[in-house]
Image (spheres, coloured by chain):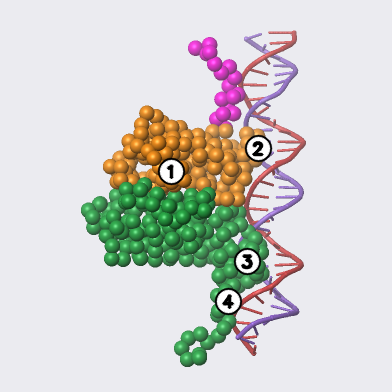
Chain colours: A orange, B green, C purple, D red
Amino acid sequence: MTVASKPDGRVARREGTREAIMAAATDLFAARGVTSTSIDDIAEAAGIAKGSIYYNFESKAGLVEAILARSSELLTEALAKAGDGRHGRELRAAVVTELLELLRAHPGGARVLVTELFRTERSWREAIANWRGLALAPLIADLRASGVPADRAQLRAAAIVGATLTAGLEWLVFDPQLELATVRQSVLESLGLD
Amino acid sequence: MTVASKPDGRVARREGTREAIMAAATDLFAARGVTSTSIDDIAEAAGIAKGSIYYNFESKAGLVEAILARSSELLTEALAKAGDGRHGRELRAAVVTELLELLRAHPGGARVLVTELFRTERSWREAIANWRGLALAPLIADLRASGVPADRAQLRAAAIVGATLTAGLEWLVFDPQLELATVRQSVLESLGLD
DNA sequence: CTTTTTGCAATGACCGGTCAGTTCAACTAC
DNA sequence: GTAGTTGAACTGACCGGTCATTGCAAAAAG
């Protein structure tokens, strides 16, 4: 082996630290909030030195943006996958399923995203707004294709995603022993999609 | 006068200061988050002295709890009113209407409540959990009366309230020019209650 | 194969600034 | 007189960001 790719073990090392930092930061941000989490807290939780955080990220805001960017990317992929080849109720049901699976795989990222979604005086506000538009695009497009006017489609998309995220967080934060299928079924019933 | 109650105009004066502090703090907390808002910011925004905040509230955490308590109280009242004498789909539709009206009247409080809802390492976490159970009680009770098992009723209540709050915040934060009726109709359609 | 060099990655003590909370003497409305 | 308010001054803890220094893996030289 070894013919093809990565010749340098250093990039792997650095990638490892970046990953450890982001993972630790995501969990702490989710539990305490961004501002209540210090860089020292993150360094300690990640088991690396404070300086390494600033070696790998420009600033605390940069770290937050990197985390939000990845969460948004995953969200966009999930909704794109749900929309692929589906329409109407079937598509909306797939959105619920994909979102819950994503939520289970990355609960911390979702919590950070949700808490930052409606903040108006944060440096990364604009970035979030853009990503949200991108992520919701497939769902909104399908609603519009079904004859729903633009502003209403936006609201309905928000309601569908909001219902799923809220029930999903309720599940993961307060009743993590429940099965995904149970949660899925409940959300579908709530949305009249069962 | 003076027979029955108010013996002193000073309590009204003090109530005014308390109100001004809570109003200013709520707006700032909603936009920037609790930890990113300083006591000096609040005093300046409220047009009162810093000392008055500590005369009227025990601490910053105490102020936050007072705000969350009032928001939760309003939420409980709204859901109780929606549940009064109604059942099934009619009740759930009334929940949507009451919540949106409450949201329009107190957008800041709702935003603070939502962002703190899923935090797990805050001093007021327990208080929020209790208030939430209390507020959702009428909705959950009706779902259970319709034959939904306990854990599912909890999830469905979360989904219904989550859908309404998410769409409602979308409305107030990003499209405040829309009519309440439009938002209401969109949420009802999303929940299959139209 | 062994030794030396190179430069990326990681470190943690440190600095300047911020903020919650305290104190208090003067002032105001009742 | 007294409950409530003011605003400035102060403290001590904490926090984001910096930087001189060290560690270390790979490349170059022998």
The answer to whether one can see residue A172 in this image is no
The span from disc 3 to disc 2 (Cα, nearest Å) is 36 Å
Q: Are marks 1 and 3 on the same chain?
A: no
Image quadrant in which you'd find residue A156: top left
The reply to whether callout 4 and callout 3 are in contact (CB within 8 Å) is no
The reply to whether callout 2 and callout 1 are in contact (CB within 8 Å) is no
Name the residue that disc number 2 marks.
A58
Name the residue that disc number 4 marks.
B14
Relative to residue B112, is residue A43 depicted above or below?
above
| Mark 4 belongs to chain | B
Q: Residue placed at 62% from the left, 66% from the top? A: B46
Name the residue that disc number 1 marks.
A149
Name the residue that disc number 3 marks.
B46
The span from disc 2 to disc 4 (Cα, nearest Å) is 47 Å
Task: Return the disc, 4 or 3, that comes first in the chain's sequence.
Answer: 4
Task: Report helix, strand or loop for mark 4.
Answer: helix
Closer-to-camera residue (A134/B178)? B178
Closer-to-camera residue (B133/B16)? B16
| Mark 2 belongs to chain | A
